[in-house]
Amino acid sequence: MKPVIPFLLAAAAALCACAHAPADAFPDSRAGAGGVQPADRMAAIDGQRDIVIAVANPVSPPAPHAASNVLGYGTADQYRNGQRAMSTLDELKRQYRLREIVGWPIKPLGLYCAVLRPASGADRDALLKALSADARVRIAERLQEYDVYAGQPGEMRYDDPYVRLQRGFAEIDAPLAQQSSQGRGVDVALVDTGVDLAHPDLKDRIRGAYNMVDDDAAAFRRDLHGTEVAGVIAAAGGNKVGIVGIAPQARLSAYKACWHPAGAGSARCNTFTLAKALAALIDTDTRIINMSLGGPPDLLLEQLLAVLLRQDRIVVAAMPPDGRVAGFPAAMPGVIVVRSAQARKAPAGVVDAPGTDILTTQPDGRYGFASGSSLAAAHVSGIAALLLSLAPALDAREVRAILERSSMGPGDNRQVNAAAAIAALPGARSADPRKRTTR
């Protein structure tokens, strides 16, 4: 029985990691399965070659009594159930000539997933067709890659950033809305890059930081995109520095599923990292999930996000730059899709929010201007936090309806308005900017 002990310890670490992993320590599932160490796994994964396979993993939940073991396998039969997924995967690797890069369990779906590399010269599409027809395989698909939706950061235009420079903050009447709500008691999860956890406008707003990419805590804190999105949503107010977020008393949880490749400005994500983040969120009570990213449809990610939507989460996604709502996560029913406000009317089901020249937080305690639908989505997540703080029972459908009917602007150029949204709550004291008196 001695050889079983290392496996149990490694598996226990993997299961815990899928729930919540700190930014400076995210142990890899099935470490060493493909000779890949945790810090190297993103470099080892190749989106142009690799595939994702999921097999059934009928592992029972941990036993609720004292003296239960670390995995919660109460009987030998239950242990064999978990082992059966490993055996199935090993059979598939031998039969189809696959090399495992990394694997991880997804308990909410009862699956064990792995990123695998086909043999050199193999036809990936033909291989996926064969795997999809194999009764042992639940999911077989390409390893998809995703982008975050922000423009290249602009230069600092002023030496000293102030609230009066926050274009989006003023346009949506956030100062008026904050007389009624500042998002107290509401948790917002960012599925994004890392965040500067020590930034003076963010350090007191971060509830948790979880790294689904690597073990590099320093890189986590240097990441640009997530830091920018975090500042728009919940930068601290009244601290005499920097800017103010739309919901300055909301709490943020940063799930790093995207990273900035060396030498590239845009951040990237993939099926593997996003699945880890979504699976971890299923076990939390966070109501709002901001996903300022997007890419192609993905069966595994869609199943995970469907679980979260059934749990009454409010998922806010950025509209792709090409204006097509056809991929993940924007195409998922129930997701609130946001684009950067434009003169032409938004497509059905899409809301407009400020997304051009937005002053926000940046790594190393800095501030800067950024543009893109990523920033627009952050404005909407902030407004959702203001609403939930006043009316915690609101569901995603109601939040979307409030946003749509309270949007303001001339003609088709309508965008969300925080004060009008609060005024649209049943029984709310009016904070509607349309009802202000002129002096």
Image (cartoon, rainbow, N blue to C red):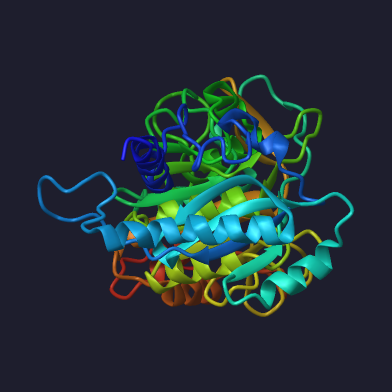
- Side of 296 relative to 366 (left or right): right
Q: Which percent across, then down, holds residue 421?
A: 45, 66
**In the rendered view of the protein, which quadrant contains the N terminus?**
top left
Q: Which percent across, then down, holds residue 309?
A: 45, 70
Q: Which percent across, then down, holds residue 10?
A: 41, 38
Q: Which percent across, then down, holds residue 87?
A: 51, 57
Q: Nearer the viewer, residue 434 or 220?
A: 220
Q: Nearer the viewer, residue 37 or 366?
A: 37
User: Which image quadrant for residue 36?
Assistant: top right
Q: Residue at the front extreme?
A: 1
User: Which image quadrant for residue 409?
Assistant: bottom right
Q: Residue at the left extreme?
A: 66
Residue 326 visible to an observer of this rendering: no
- Name the residue rendered at 60%, 40% in the picture: 193
Q: Nearer the viewer, residue 151 or 103?
A: 103
Tally the marks.
0
Please determine whether, in this image, residue 362 is positioned above or below residue 355.
above
Residue 312 visible to an observer of this rendering: yes
- Name the residue rendered at 40%, 44% in the picture: 11
- Name the residue rendered at 44%, 66% in the picture: 109
- Side of 393 relative to 199 (left or right): left
- Name the residue rendered at 49%, 55% in the picture: 86
- Side of 78 relative to 137 (left or right): left
Q: Nearer the viewer, residue 77 or 49?
A: 77
